[in-house]
Image: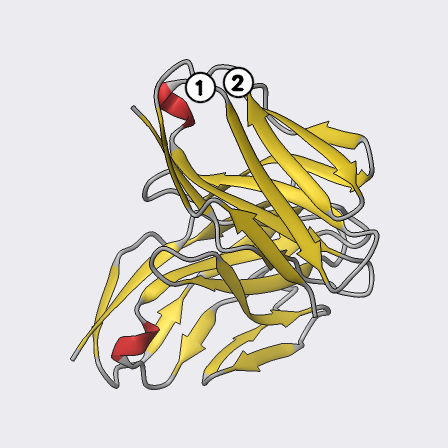
């Protein structure tokens, strides 16, 4: 089965600083990849998804961007963080032979 | 668009009590339906799934039945344990769709 690696697990960043969160997938190829954000006590908001290298779809306009430089690598970035970017960021992967998505352990980002 | 509505929490139960968490959905066609569980500080894990009407998903004593006529996928467990304390998310993915749509989540507390 798929294994999703995310790092770092926890991050505290000042307002205005850049961000790079990385997600890599093991155990499969050609996955669909997803970035979700979970605000404190809230549900999951889909931020970006990708169906292939270099292909990114954005779900909501925001201060973040995503890139997929390799088949099993998905990166979430920002040039200048805002306080409202704080949250729990989850990477997920799904292939066509699975109906369900698999999730990483998440990165808790606190912007101060 | 597709959406998932689940009962608001938190839900507080005593150990060995019966659990029901309601979930209804809006989608065209026959989506796949899922329940995910999130333990504190972790990512989401698939708890169970159902891919067609009248299917029953089950795992670890939890069950949910895909009811097309009522567009529902309620989660049940006959006897909860303290270790079941977590946040539970109902979700759907349209047939052939790329995105998994999540409900807002329901936090469950089980007291000893």
Q: Which residue is located at x 49 percent, y 49 percent?
A: B103
- Tag 1's secondary structure? loop
Disc 1: which chain? A
Q: Is residue A49 above or below residue B61?
A: above
Q: Is residue A107 above or below residue B88?
A: above
Q: Dividing the picture into quarters, in which one does residue B22 lie?
A: bottom left
- Tag 2's secondary structure? loop
Q: Which residue is located at x 52 percent, y 65 percent?
A: B45
Q: Dividing the picture into quarters, in which one does residue A81 lie?
A: top left
Task: Classify 10 Å Cα crowding around label 2: few (below 14), some (14-19), many (20 and above).
Answer: few
Q: Position of residue B25 (x, y in %)?
A: 57, 53
Q: Position of residue A103 (x, y in %)?
A: 57, 56
Taking the image as shown, residue B12 lies to the left or right of residue B65, namely: left
- What residue does disc 1 label? A81
Q: Earlier in the sequence, mark 1 or mark 2?
A: 2
Disc 2: which chain? A
Mark 1 vs mark 2, CA separation in Å:
7 Å
Q: Which residue is located at x 70 percent, y 30 percent?
A: A67
Q: Position of residue B93 (x, y in %)?
A: 68, 53
Nearer the observer, A29 or A39:
A29
Q: Work out which quarter of the rendered image holds the N terminus of chain B and state it.
A: top right
Q: Dividing the picture into quarters, in which one does residue A111 lie?
A: top left
Taking the image as shown, residue A86 lies to the left or right of residue A22, namely: left
Q: Nearer the viewer, mark 1 or mark 2?
A: 1
- What residue does disc 2 label? A63
User: Mark 2 and mark 1 in contact (Cβ < 8 Å)?
Assistant: yes
């Amino acid at each position: 089965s798929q294994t999703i690696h995310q790092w770092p697990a926890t991050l505290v960043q000042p307002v205005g600083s850049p961000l790079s969160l990385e997600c890599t997938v093991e155990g499969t190829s050609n996955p669909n990849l997803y970035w979700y954000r979970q605000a404190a006590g809230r549900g999951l908001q889909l931020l970006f998804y990708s169906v292939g290298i270099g292909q990114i779809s954005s779900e909501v306009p925001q201060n973040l961007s995503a890139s997929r430089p390799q088949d099993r690598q998905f990166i979430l970035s920002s040039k200048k963080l805002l306080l409202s970017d704080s949250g729990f960021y989850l990477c997920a992967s799904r292939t066509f032979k699975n109906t369900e998505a698999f999730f990483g352990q998440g990165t808790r980002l606190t912007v101060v | 668009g597709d959406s998932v509505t689940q009962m608001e929490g938190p839900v507080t139960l005593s150990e060995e009590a019966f659990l029901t968490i309601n979930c209804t959905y809006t989608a065209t066609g026959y989506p796949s339906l899922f329940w995910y569980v999130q333990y504190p500080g972790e990512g989401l894990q698939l708890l169970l799934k159902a891919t067609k009407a009248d299917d029953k998903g089950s795992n670890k004593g939890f069950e949910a039945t895909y009811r097309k006529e009522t567009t529902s996928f309620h989660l049940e467990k006959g006897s909860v344990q303290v270790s079941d304390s977590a946040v539970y998310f109902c979700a759907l993915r349209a047939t052939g769709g790329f995105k998994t749509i999540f409900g807002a989540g329901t936090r469950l507390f089980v007291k000893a």
